[in-house]
Every structure is written in C-alpha cells, then in structure tokens.
Amino acid sequence: METKSKLLDPRKVDLSQVGSAIGLILVVIVASVITQGSFLSASNLTNIFRQVTIMGFASLGMCIVIITGNIDLSIIGNVSMTTVITAVLMVKEVPTPLIILIVLLSGMAVGLVNGIILSVWRIESFVVTMGMQVVCFGMAMLVSGNRTVIVPGSSLAKYGFLTNLAQWKVTVIPKVLVFPVMFLIMLAFYLLFWVFTTRTKMGRYIFALGGNEEVSYISGVNVSLVRVVAYLLSGLTAAIAGIFMFSRSMCGDPTAGNALGMYVVAAVVVGGTKMSGGRGNVLFNIMGIFVIGIINNVLNLVGAPYQLQQIIQGMIIILAVVMSSPKRK
C-alpha cells in the first residue's frame, strides 16, 4: 500500500537546491572577474563542458544511490576498470557494439554485486563499496598488466565512433557557444533519469527508501530490489564515464578514476542532494558538477599551485558534506 504521506515527493524543490542555483551564478560571476573575461571565451567554455561530462555521468549514478540513503565509493574504481577494458578490447579489435556492450555489462556487474551484498547483509554501504573500489582497481591493474594500455594507431583508425566521441561538437553560435556531443549526451541521460525518478513508481520508491526504509517496507516496497536497481544504475553511468574517459585520453589508464576522487560526492551534495537520503533532484546535480568544474577550471586558468588547488578542493568537499549533514542534537 502506498500513500503520499509515506512516500516523499521527488519533484519537490527545497531551499538547498535553490541555493545550488544561486551558488552557480555567484561562481560564474567570480570566475569571470578573476580571469578578466578569459573564463567566458568559447574555447574555455567548450573545455569546461568536456571536463564536467565525465564527472557528470559518474555523479549521476552517485546521486541516485545517495537519494536511497547509501553511497557508492566503488564508482572511481569502476571508471578505471571500464576505461581499461575499453582499451584492451580495442587492442584486440573487438567490434564496437560488442565493446560497448561488454563495458556496460562490466560496470553494471559491479553495481549488481554492491546491491546484492547490501540487500542480503546489513553492512554499511561505505565499507562494502570501498572494498569494491579496491577490487575494481585491482581488476584494472590485472587486465592492463599494471600499465597504461596504449591502443596502436592502426587499431584506433578502425574505431571512429569511440575515438571521436569526445571530439565531436555542435556549434550553436560560431566562436561563442560550442557544445561537445558528449556533453549533450550527458544532458540527455540527466533528462532520462529525471523522468525515471519523478514519473515512475520505481523512481518514487528510490526516494521512499532514502526517506525511511522501515516505512517503505511496511508500505509494501521491495526495498532490496530498489537498492539493487539504484546500484545497477550507478554501475551503468560509471561504465559510460569510463568509455568517455577513454575517448578523451585514447588510452586505458588503470588509475584514471582517481582524477574524479571525491568530486563525484561533492558535486552531488553541492547540487542539493542530502547525504541522509530521501531528498534530491538529478537535474540540480548538473549545477553541482558545474560549480566543481568551474572552480577547478579557474584555479588552472590563474595558475594556482597544485598544492593550493588540492587544499581549496578539499575544503570545498568538506564544506559541501558539512552543509548537507544534519547537526548533532
């Protein structure tokens, strides 16, 4: 049995999500002033669109999982593993459709294992997914032979779709606004996931699980199935991020996912999703990835020392998590 009082409305916008929009506007203004306008150049904006796409896919799955009241730290390992698998399969000259299928299934397999373990045993998702992250990094090292997999030029030439995926662009206003195709694909997935979370029964159950698992169970929700679905989606988007990661670098780096780090979590929280679960909106997650992406971009534009970048980025992550977490009573 399902009632409105028991299941949270996923379409409701709260103050933290409005704050995300205001925060993004402020970041853009400050970035424009600090960089003396170079931030708004067409080439830099296109570069930002590319940079946020991989983080956007990874944090999309993380957003779904956090809404359920869980977390998925295996994502960065999953991205590394699927990036390597993509490169290795290209070296072996496996057909493109089969490569995409194998990579997506590999990523989803990680999510499936996470979901099943967390549904069968009452273990903290932090612990399980951290362990799975290590497993994924180990698999990446094993498959790659503990080295970066370089795809020969002769093989790359046979994979126009996978190699050009990160290069294709759509020009809206010449020399002013140019969107990478990979960014537009990401937006399409965000719209699809928004429809899923706001217009389907499973989507409402995802919010209900994060709001109150016990009440959801009493209301007749199959909480185990919902949890597994959330982690399957997280594995799927991590695999897509892995494919795009390869397309940008043209190699299979077993440590590629490290570049995402905790930014994936920070972007979700900055986007207004509550770490406690039950509250969030995948579309506002886009604002989160842009806030993180723009800050990183500006630090590079002004030539900030790497050490300072790490300090600032770490502080942003801490601040984002603190603002999302309830105070102790």
Image: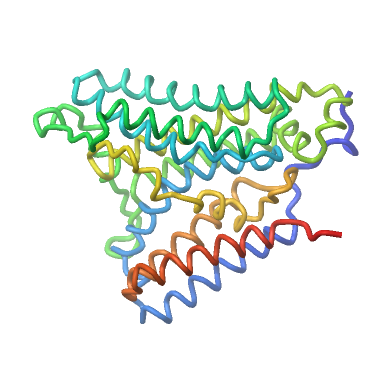
- The C terminus lies in which quarter of the figure? bottom right
Is residue 165 shown left or right of residue 1? Answer: left
Instruction: Give coordinates of residue 245: x percent, y percent.
Output: 33, 41
Residue in front for this viewpoint, 256 or 154: 256
Is residue 207 shown left or right of residue 145? Answer: right
Instruction: Give coordinates of residue 238: x percent, y percent.
Output: 46, 36
Residue sitting at x 41%, y 68%: 309
Instruction: Give coordinates of residue 62: x percent, y percent.
Output: 57, 41
Residue in front for this viewpoint, 38 or 111: 111
Give the quarter of the image for residue 45: bottom left
Residue sitting at x 63%, y 23%: 117
Residue sitting at x 56%, y 55%: 266
Residue sitting at x 59%, y 68%: 23
Residue in front for this viewpoint, 3 or 216: 216
- The N terminus lies in which quarter of the figure? top right
Q: Can the viewer see residue 43 in this picture?
A: yes
